[in-house]
C-alpha cells in the first residue's frame, strides 16, 4: 500500500478514534433529533486508467479466453481487480489469443495468453497454452506482489511479467475493465 496513503488513513483513523473517545460521553447525552448526517470520503476500489487507452475488437475465441481468465480468477478466490490486471496483461502480451510456437516471430519460447516461457519456469508448453493453467500461474505471481490491489495496473502486471516494455500494460486497462464488467456475472 502506498506509504503516504497509509499514513493519511492512519491519521484519519486516529482522529476519528480520539474524537470518539472525547465526544462519546457528551454525545451519549445529546438529543438524537439534533444529529446531522456526516459525509465520508471513500476511495474508489479501482484506480483510474493511466495514459492513452488502446482498444481492439475481439472475436469469439478471444471472448472465450476472457471468460476463461475470469473463471480462473473466481476459482482462485480473487476479486474483479485481479481479472482486470490479468486481462489487460493478456491484451498486451497476446491480444487475448492463445499463442502457440510462432517460429522466428516468437519472442524466445513465449507461449499462451500471457507469453509465458517454459524455460523461465512457467510450466510445460501444454500447460502454458491451457488458459486456466496460464491464468492461475499469472495469478499466483500476482498474489506474491505486496499491495498489488492498490498499485497501478501496469506496475502490478510488470512485477509479475518482467517485460521489456513495463509501461505497455496501462493502455489496456479500460478495455479490460469493460470486459470484466461485461462478463464477471455471466
Image (cartoon, grey):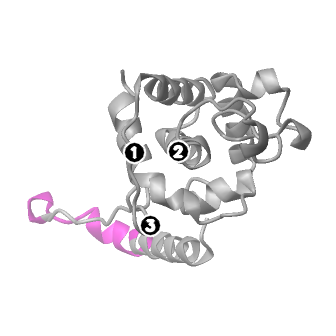
Q: Please identify the quarter of the rendering in which residue 58 is found.
A: top left
Q: In this figure, which residue is indicated by the disc labeled 3?
A: 50
State the CA–CA distance, disc 2 to disc 1: 9 Å
State the CA–CA distance, disc 2 to disc 3: 16 Å
Picture coordinates of residue 164, whole percent (x, y): 72, 63
Q: Is residue 42 left or right of residue 150?
A: left
Other-residue count near label 2 (Cα within 10 Å), few / some / many at <14 / 14–19 / ≥20? many
Above or below residue 13? Residue 147 is above
Picture coordinates of residue 175, whole percent (x, y): 39, 47
Closer to the camera, 21 or 146?
146
* Helix, strand or loop under label 2: helix
Q: Residue furthest left?
A: 33
Q: In this figure, which residue is indicated by the disc labeled 1?
A: 56
- In percent of the image, x 39 and y 62: which residue is there? 43
Q: In this figure, which residue is indicated by the disc labeled 2?
A: 91
Q: Is residue 22 left or right of residue 124?
A: left
In the picture, the quarter occupied by the C terminus is: top left
Q: Please name which of the two marks, 1 or 3, marks the residue nearer to the observer.
A: 1
Closer to the camera, 173 or 81?
173
Above or below residue 39? Residue 83 is above
Q: Please name which of the two marks, 2 or 3, marks the residue nearer to the observer.
A: 2
Q: Magenta stretch?
A: 20-34
**Tag 1–tag 3 contact (CB < 8 Å):** no
State the CA–CA distance, disc 1 to disc 3: 18 Å
Above or below residue 121? Residue 169 is below
Q: Does label 2 or label 1 sit earlier along the sequence?
A: 1
Amino acid at each position: 500500500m502506498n506509504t503516504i496513503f497509509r499514513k493519511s488513513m492512519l491519521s484519519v483513523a486516529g482522529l476519528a478514534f480520539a474524537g470518539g473517545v472525547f465526544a462519546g460521553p457528551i454525545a451519549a447525552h445529546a438529543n438524537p433529533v439534533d444529529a446531522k448526517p456526516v459525509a465520508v470520503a471513500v476511495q474508489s476500489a479501482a484506480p483510474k486508467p493511466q495514459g492513452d487507452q488502446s482498444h481492439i475488437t475481439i472475436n469469439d475465441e478471444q471472448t472465450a479466453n476472457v471468460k476463461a481468465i475470469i473463471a480462473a480468477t473466481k476459482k482462485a478466490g480473487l476479486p474483479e481487480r485481479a481479472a482486470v490486471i490479468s486481462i489487460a496483461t493478456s491484451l498486451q502480451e497476446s491480444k487475448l489469443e492463445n499463442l502457440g510456437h510462432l517460429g522466428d516471430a516468437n519472442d524466445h519460447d513465449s507461449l499462451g495468453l500471457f507469453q509465458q516461457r517454459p524455460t523461465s519456469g512457467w510450466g510445460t508448453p501444454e500447460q502454458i497454452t491451457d488458459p486456466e493453467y496460464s491464468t492461475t500461474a499469472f495469478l499466483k505471481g500476482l498474489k506474491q506482489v505486496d499491495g498489488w490491489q492498490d498499485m497501478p495496473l501496469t506496475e502490478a502486471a510488470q512485477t509479475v511479467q518482467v517485460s521489456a516494455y513495463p509501461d505497455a500494460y496501462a493502455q489496456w486497462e479500460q478495455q479490460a475493465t469493460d470486459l470484466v464488467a461485461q462478463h464477471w456475472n455471466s
